[in-house]
Amino acid sequence: MKYMLMIYDNPDTRSVFFGPEGAGLMAEMEALMGELTESGELVSTDALADPSSSKVVRVRDDVPVITDGPLAEAKEHFGGYLIVDCESEARALDIAARWPSAKIAAMEVRPILDPAGEEM
C-alpha cells in the first residue's frame, strides 16, 4: 500500500536541522532514506519551499482569484513529504516515527487512493 508521510514544521523546527544537533538529525535522515531506498519502499520525497513563496488559487464566479501565502494562518506548515509503498499502515507509522522531524514536529500518515478511490 502507498502512503504519504507529510512533514509539518515551522521556522523554529527547521532551524534545529542547521543548529548544533542538526548533524545528528541529518545523519539519521540519511540512514533512514538509505534503508527505504534499499528496501524499495521509497517512492519519492521532496522538501517544500517556505510557505511565503506559495500562492493560493480560488475560483469564484468562474474567475480565478490568486493570493499570496499559505492557505491558512497556522504556526506549522506542510514542509515536505515522503511517499512510501509498504506492506501495512503499521510499517508506514513506524517509518514516520523514525523520521527525525517527528522528534520536534508533527508527521501525518495518510493512505493514497487510486483513481477509483481505492487505497493503493
Image (spheres, grey):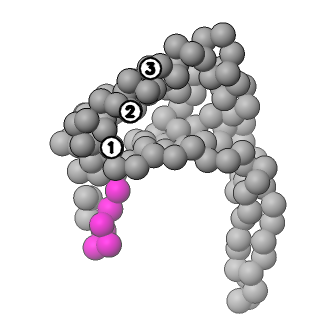
Precedes in sequence: disc 3 or disc 2: 3
Q: Which residue is mark 2?
A: 33
Range covered by the magenta-colored residues: 112-117
Instruction: Kindly identify the amino acid type of the residue bearing the numbered disc 2.
Output: Met
Residue at figure coordinates x 40%, y 49% from the top left: 44
Mark 3 and mark 1 residues within 8 Å of each other at the beta carbon: no
Indicate whether 93 appears above or below 120.
Answer: above
Mark 3 Cα shell of 10 Å, populated few (<14), some (14-19), many (≥20):
some
Q: Which residue is mark 1?
A: 42
Mark 2 and mark 1 residues within 8 Å of each other at the beta carbon: yes
- CA distance separating discs 3 and 1: 16 Å
Q: Position of residue 42 (x, y in %)?
A: 33, 43
Precedes in sequence: disc 3 or disc 1: 3
User: Residue extending furthest right?
Assistant: 68
Mark 1 Cα shell of 10 Å, populated few (<14), some (14-19), many (≥20):
some
Q: Secondary structure beneath disc 3?
A: helix
Indicate whether 46 appears above or below 57.
Answer: above
Q: Which residue is mark 3?
A: 28
